[in-house]
Image (spheres, rainbow, N blue to C red):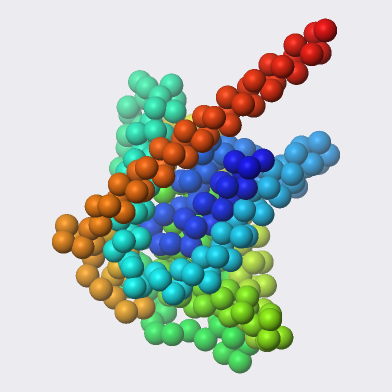
Amino acid sequence: MIMKILGGFLMALADSVPGVSGGTIAFILGLYDDFINSLNNIVSKDKEKRKAAFLFLLKLGSGWIVGMAGAAMVITSIFEKHIYAISSLFIGFVLFSIPLIIMEEKETLKGKYKNLVFTVLGILLLVAITYLAQNGILKGNVDLSISGLNFGLCIYVFFAAMCAISAMVLPGISGSTLLLVFGIYQAILGALKGLLTGVIKGDFSYLPIVIIFAAGVAVGIFTIVKLLKRGLEKHRSAMMYFILGMMIGSLYAIVMGPTSISEPVDPLSWKTFGFVYFVAGGIIIFGLQALKGAFEKREAEKDAAKQVEEQK
């Protein structure tokens, strides 16, 4: 349970920063297949599958909500001031996680080298998305409070939410980067922060757009998840090569991330690269991997003890 809550918390932190996907964190922690299956089974006709999916998503979701609320309150304040440190940290996350995923999926990847073409496609997809993020569709500040809303903007935010959450489910693609593409990344984080701080004062001017965004998220989840589940079941090798390509491509997205913020700065360079933060990212990844192993070992011991008890 602790691992799932922690996983949800870390997924939210990753989802809130352009360049990194919460799906990557889920994959590193070994939660990805359960995550996809649970999203698919939450609307299943099978009562037991529905119940198991609900419990899994409740644990993961509780951590995600806390993480996203914290990110909305904190990231908006520190993101631009420490963009190079954050970028260096997430490069460490992605770069150190790639070999771990390759080792974990070695049986799926071994001997299927023709599928490397999907790795190339994954890289090209991320490069294209990054280019679009540098040339966001909307320019300038967007007012998402109730006074600034109109029908067209509501539809636009709904569609952007659909695309962003679909990306968040995929390892390698950052939903936040897609929000940058649509030009509403800062505005959405600002709306979340405005709602959280406004509730205390009785100000709900950001509630309508948050509801619209949440509705887009829900629709996006249930349209993309079935395709992902089918792909992982029937074409896992090709999907894994594609996912690895997206993760490699996300390194470029992170490097270029500073050019896409509201006050653009130069891309990450050797001069601005934070080696300490990069190493910290690697330490966190290997720490999470060790934590995952410890939890899996404990669960295995509990299952073994249960089987012995049942045999008596």
Total numbered labels: 0
Q: Quadrant of the N terminus?
A: top right
Please tell me which residue lies in front, 110 or 189: 189
Q: Residue at x 58, y 47 (%)?
A: 6
- The percent coordinates of residue 252 (x first, y second) are 28, 55
Please tell me which residue lies in front, 281 or 107: 281
Residue most extreme to the top: 312
Q: Is residue 84 above or below residue 292?
A: below
Please tell me which residue lies in front, 261 or 157: 261
- The percent coordinates of residue 199 (x first, y second) are 68, 80
Q: Can residue 258 be seen in the rendering of this structure?
A: yes
Image side of residue 134 versus residue 42, left or right = left
Image side of residue 175 versus residue 149, left or right = left
Q: Is residue 6 above or below residue 196?
A: above
- The percent coordinates of residue 230 (x first, y second) are 58, 37
Q: Residue at x 36, y 78 (%)?
A: 262
- The percent coordinates of residue 304 (x first, y second) are 68, 16
Q: Quadrant of the C terminus?
A: top right
Residue most extreme to the bottom: 147
Q: Can residue 250 be seen in the rendering of this structure?
A: no
Q: Is residue 181 above or below residue 58?
A: below
Q: Residue at x 33, y 29 (%)?
A: 114
